[in-house]
Amino acid sequence: MSSNDARALARALLDLCRSRKLTIATAESCTGGLVAGALTDIPGSSDVIDRGFVTYSNEAKHAMLGVDTATLATFGAVSKETALAMAVGALENADVDLAVSITGIAGPGGATPGKPVGLVHFAVAARDGRIAHREQRFGAIGRSNVRQRSVVEALRMLLDVARGPKPAPKTKRAPAADLHKRVARSPRRAAAKRPQPKKAVKPKPDKT
């Protein structure tokens, strides 16, 4: 993946968000603001990008995004649970429609049992209640490569979610506090059941 890939995805994402009137916030750990940088490198991105949180330490994740200390202690900074909490926290702390989070181990150090170098967790939270999570194991491909591939993956996730149902109007936003309880699926409307016409009962002939 090259910087050209990230730039092309960033342009596509910004164009899509403009057409759908969506705004974005980022919450980054191992990428240190590279996703926000890729997006704001495009001229005119200020109508889509609201803010970016760089929360490298656990203390920053808790203070800036509201990630519960129990979540960090139980699952660790590099985990699905923390990534989801970061995305929801960014959504709660910014008046936006979409928030993406990244937390991982870019290397060369930092690996622990079960969590190798190149492990990265991603999450996107939408104002309409949708939450998506992805786990990637890029391997020990070098710190810069892990970070660059993480940027590309985050932009792809944002594109996927931005193409989905349009969030609620900005004048009436839904609270984000309970998003972590939602399932990462688009809401489905129950199909209306049409009343079936009753079949006419034919009279039985009299037996003689």
Image (spheres, rainbow, N blue to C red):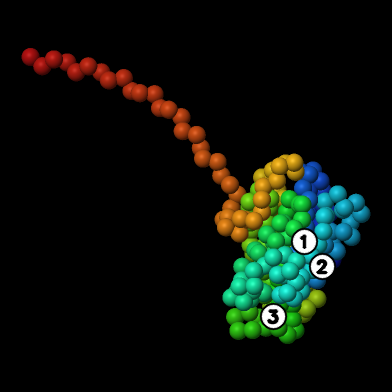
Question: Which is more N-terminal, label 2 or label 1?
Answer: 1
Residue 108 x %, y %: 75, 84
Q: Is residue 183 above or below residue 187?
A: below
| Closest to the observer, 22 or 207 | 22
Sequence-wise, the earlier of marks 1 and 3 is 1
> Which residue corresponds to mark 2?
33
Instruction: Give the residue at x 64% y 56%.
Output: 177
**69 sits left or right of 14 in the view:** left
Of residue 29 and residue 91, the one placed in the foreground of this image is 91
Q: Is label 1 in a helix, a strand or a loop?
A: strand
- Residue at position x 55%, y 41% from top? 189
The three-letter amino acid code for the residue at tag 3 is Val
Disc number lying in front (2 or 3): 2
Asked whether disc 1 touches disc 2, contact meaning CB atoms under 8 Å apart, the reply is yes
Report how far apart the C-alphas of labels 1 and 3 lie in the structure. 23 Å
Q: In the figure, residue 53 lies in which quadrant?
A: bottom right
Task: State the mark number for residue 26.
Answer: 1
Give the farthest residue toward the right. 43
Q: Could you tell me if residue 201 is visible in this image?
A: yes
Residue at disc 2, secondary structure: loop
Percent x, y for residue 172? 71, 42
Q: Which residue is mark 3?
A: 117
Asked if residue 142 is positioned above or below residue 25 in the image, the reply reads below
Within 10 angstroms of label 2, few (less than 14), some, or many (20 or more) residues? some
- Mark 1 nearby-residue class (10 Å; few <14, some 14–19, many ≥20): many
Q: Residue at x 73, y 50 (%)?
A: 97
The image quadrant where one finds the C terminus is: top left
